Image (cartoon, rainbow, N blue to C red):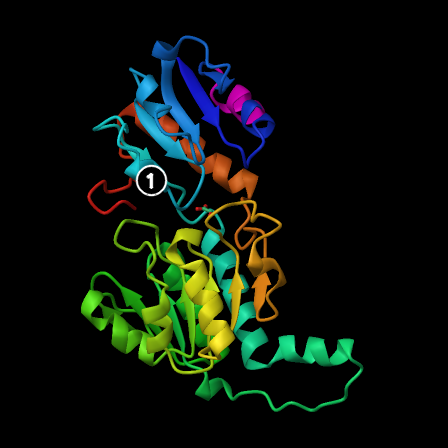
Amino acid sequence: MTILFYSEADSAEPWREAFARELPHIAFRVWPDAGPLESVRYALVWNPPRGLLARLPNLKAILALGAGVDPIPTDPTLPKGVPLLRLVDVGFPAQMAEYAIYAVLKFQRRMGELDDLQRRAQWNQLDPFFARDFPVGVMGLGVIGKVVAQRLSAVGYAVAGWARGPKTIENVEVYSARGRLKDFLARSRVVVNALPLTPQTENILDAAAFATMPRGGYVVNIGRGAHLVDRDLIDALDSGQLAGAMLDVFREEPLPSTHPFWRHPKIVVTPHIAAPTIASEVQAQVIDNIRRLERGEPPVGLVDPSRGY
Ligand code: GLV
């Protein structure tokens, strides 16, 4: 029995050690050194190339090395009926909330503008915006978005969330269903995107969304690069409709050095670090899930194929 590892973003070595220690009866192999493909029972993967999973005839489960599982569900060759698991919690929500709080405070307290003034040695006492005039909207109220929304609300912002279905979260005004998206955007000075990437949410942050937001709004993207239409963001910033953006995820990662986001004066770029993997927590969840699967018990983080997350 083999577990096959594939990731260009994570090192295999800590996993090799964890499996040797915790599940010594399962052989750990790193693609392309997979050994006989019929022996692979589990695939532990981040961003696997299309068609890779379809080559494993005895696959019992796909364990994604992420909270987001895209692009796996949209791979047309994905073996049907094989459970796909994502990482749930493992420290991600709190870290995402820290990133979002930092971004919103930075915009509300005008820290980017103050950085520029310091660089020019200019003493200019810019008034901050009032937190109460800075309504924040969180897109996606899943395991991550919920914590992001709650913690932003605890800082003192008027927080709303937008989700597919109805939810109740204390101190967070919930707009549910596609039809409420406009109202949600219209009231949100800052939009923080924590959605999963699905065909329904791709390109959701586009020119129409920015035009619906109040003039001088801000966008924080901690979801996926493909939620955002890059050109529309630049146009909205250049026209003054948006005042700034802080982006952690991109259509192409690493973000190519020639991409205009790197040098845009109103964009802060970070290299997909909002919620780094805490190896010990992630490993414990993956190993526990394999043990559950081996015992025939329900695993944690099962993706609903009809929703894609
Ligand atoms: C990271 O982006 C993840 O999905 O875990």
Magenta segment, principal secondary structure?
helix
Q: Which residues are magenta?
A: 17-24
Q: Residues within 10 Å of mark 1 (few under 14, many from 20)?
A: some
Where residue 60 sits: x, y (%)? 30, 22
Q: Is residue 243 in view?
A: no
Is 19 magenta? The answer is: yes
The reply, left or right, for residue 163 in relation to residue 237 is left
Toward the viewer: 216 or 194? 216
**Quadrant of res 188:** bottom left
Q: Where does the N terminus fall, quadrant-wise?
A: top left
What kind of element bears circle 1?
loop
**Residue in the picture at 49% in, 17% down:** 32
**Residue in the picture at 59% in, 64% down:** 268
Where residue 280 sits: x, y (%)? 55, 39
Where residue 129 sits: x, y (%)? 54, 87
Where residue 13 sits: x, y (%)? 60, 26
Q: Which residue is mark 1?
A: 300
Q: Which residue type does callout 1 highlight?
A: Val
Is 163 magenta? The answer is: no
Q: Is residue 236 in view?
A: yes
Toward the viewer: 165 or 228? 228
**Quadrant of res 160:** bottom left
